[in-house]
Image (spheres, rainbow, N blue to C red):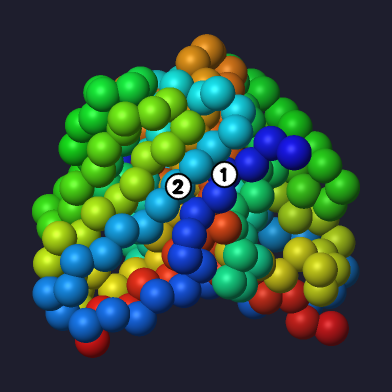
Amino acid sequence: ELKVEQNPLFLSMQEGKNYTIYCNYSTTSDRLYWYRQDPGKSLESLFVLLSNGAVKQEGRLMASLDTKARLSTLHITAAVHDLSATYFCAKREYGNKLVFGAGTILRVKS
Amino acid sequence: EAQVTQNPRYLITVTGKKLTVTCSQNMNHEYMSWYRQDPGLGLRQIYYSMNVEVTDKGDVPEGYKVSRKEKRNFPLILESPSPNQTSLYFCASSSRGWNTEAFFGQGTRLTVV
């Protein structure tokens, strides 16, 4: 059974600082996704990582995938208040099923 | 505009009163799923459908039913809601293919009292 674990579950950051969210998963399977969710909103797709060594960047966010370590990271560079949200990683299983981590609540303080 | 539409967005109901949450997508996607989101647990799959008339249980199917009579629609039915089904529900759709991504509806916040 595929399990996905994120840490930390809550992250309070100062503006301008860097930090990393970690996503570990238990079985080998393709595709890892990162989503962002604002309070009361739906999930917004951030990144789709398809293979070992994949790295994608969008603004202050960079995601990477290490399939040998079964680990993905979401790195935040020079955080700004607008990045405050909940971030989820998810792995794709059979039938296009997504197995989600518990989510990381990010709060960026000025 | 490509989208997944859920209705209603908010619903308060009483224990035992049957309800249906509708989900419709306009992208001709084969796959559709229902998830529930609870604090500290992320999203968990309730049911999924790989095509018309093909549905199967996800991780937390107890107390829910679904149907897929048309490709675009995938309603979630709670025959006898209970308070432990109070949650935020999301419908998602995706196409076949190796690098497809899922599109999520706006969510339905359900409270059962």
Q: Position of residue A88 (x, y in %)?
A: 53, 52
Q: Residue furthest bottom?
A: B113
Chain containing mark 2: B
Is residue B100 shown left or right of residue B84?
right
> Residue B68 versus residue A93: which sits nearer the camera?
B68
How many numbered discs sit on the rendered protein? 2
Instruction: Residue at 31%, 58% (x, y): give it.
Output: B20
Is residue A48 shown left or right of residue A3?
right
Relative height, residue A19 to residue B67 (above, below) = below
Chain containing mark 1: B
In the rendered image, residues at marks 2 and 1 fall on the same chain: yes
| SS at mark 1 in the image | strand
Q: Position of residue A40 (x, y in %)?
A: 58, 71
Look at the image and tell me whether residue A99 can be seen. Answer: yes
- Residue holding disc 1: B4
Pointer 1 local density, CA inside 10 Å: few below 14, some 14–19, many at least 20 = many
- Residue holding disc 2: B23
Q: Residue type at mark 1?
A: Val
